[in-house]
Image (cartoon, grey):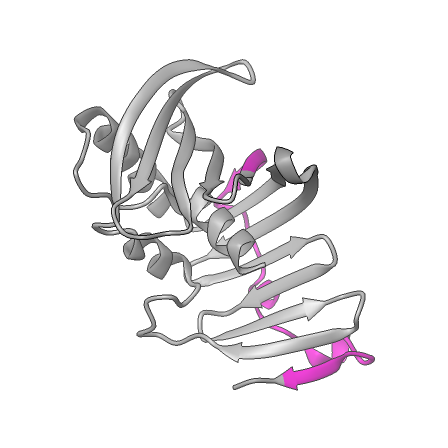
């Protein structure tokens, strides 16, 4: 689940801050970051897929991600993850359970939009691969290669050339798996109530609460 959260938030926030910069890739990513950071809220309808041909795995899930400042809400499958930037609630709908964790402000691994964006600094080599057509749009394809030891080999980011908006994002794992996040619908500056980013216990009276703070 953490992989899904980090991947999709990174997808809509930006492809990251990057080292050993390819000039064209840098210009494209800078434009994506600037446009995204200017948006007050983001709501994304996306599809997450995980494929591993050797293991015969081809799984797909639909989800909705909402972001406002350092707060977010992710609804995917039977799980809901809510964070107000300080606390994170993970709801397991089928099990009727919610786990509560603190978001560590100074933790480099903390799952917050701004921290994810900043955490990519000096971690990737960026390379512009090509311009191509993607779902009827002219797209720019960029490859990010980690400079430090990771459990994946590369990331491919497909960006709408005209809109400077990420269309899809694929992570290639060392075990042969590919994790892809495809944006089906992207809404920015939508009026999203603050209540979306907090957990209200009264709304889930039958849930067991596991407080791990």
Picture layout, residue 63 above or below residue 21: below
Q: Classify residue 166 as left or right of residue 35.
A: right
Q: 151 left or right of 136?
A: left
**Left or right relative to 181: residue 199:** right
Q: Is residue 62 left or right of residue 138?
A: right
Q: Which corner quadrant of the image does residue 136 belong to?
A: top right
Query: Which residue is at a point 48% across and 49% down the rendered structure image?
Result: 7
Q: Between 204 and 106, which is closer to the camera in this rendering?
A: 106
In the image shown, does 82 or 62 lie closer to the viewer? 62
Give the vertical position of 184 relative to 95 (above or below).
Answer: above
At 63% from the left and 33% from the top, the residue drawn is: 53
Q: Is residue 192 above or below residue 155?
A: below
Q: Position of residue 132 (x, y in %)?
A: 42, 13
Quarter occupied by residue 210: bottom right
- Is 57 or 213 nearer to us in this picture? 57
Residue at 47% of width from left, 36% of height from top?
169
Q: Position of residue 155 (x, y in %)?
A: 40, 37
Q: Which residues are magenta?
A: 181-210
Q: Where's residue 54, x and y in %? A: 63, 36
Which quarter of the rendered picture does the N terminus lie within?
Answer: bottom right
How far across and down, in percent of the image, does residue 46 sit? Answer: 61, 40
* Vertical order, 121 against 213 (above or below): above
């Amino acid at each position: 689940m953490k992989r899904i959260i980090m991947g999709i938030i990174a997808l809509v926030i930006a492809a990251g801050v990057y080292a050993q910069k390819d000039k064209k890739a840098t210009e494209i990513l800078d434009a994506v970051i600037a446009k995204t950071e200017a948006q007050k809220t983001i709501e994304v309808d996306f599809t997450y897929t995980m494929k591993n041909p050797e293991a015969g795995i081809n799984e797909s899930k639909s989800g909705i991600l909402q972001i406002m400042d350092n707060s977010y809400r992710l609804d995917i499958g039977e799980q809901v993850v809510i964070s107000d930037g300080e606390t994170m609630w993970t709801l397991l709908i089928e099990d009727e359970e919610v786990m509560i964790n603190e978001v560590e402000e100074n933790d480099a691994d903390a799952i917050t939009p701004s921290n994810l964006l900043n955490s990519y600094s000096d971690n990737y080599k960026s390379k512009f691969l090509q311009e191509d057509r993607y779902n009827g749009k002219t797209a720019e394809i960029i490859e990010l290669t980690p400079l430090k030891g990771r459990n994946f080999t590369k990331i491919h980011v497909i960006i709408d050339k005209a809109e400077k908006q990420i269309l899809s994002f694929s992570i290639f794992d060392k075990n042969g798996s590919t994790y892809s996040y495809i944006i089906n619908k992207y809404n920015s500056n939508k009026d999203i109530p603050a209540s979306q980013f907090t957990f209200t216990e009264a709304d889930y009276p039958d849930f067991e609460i596991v407080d791990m703070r």
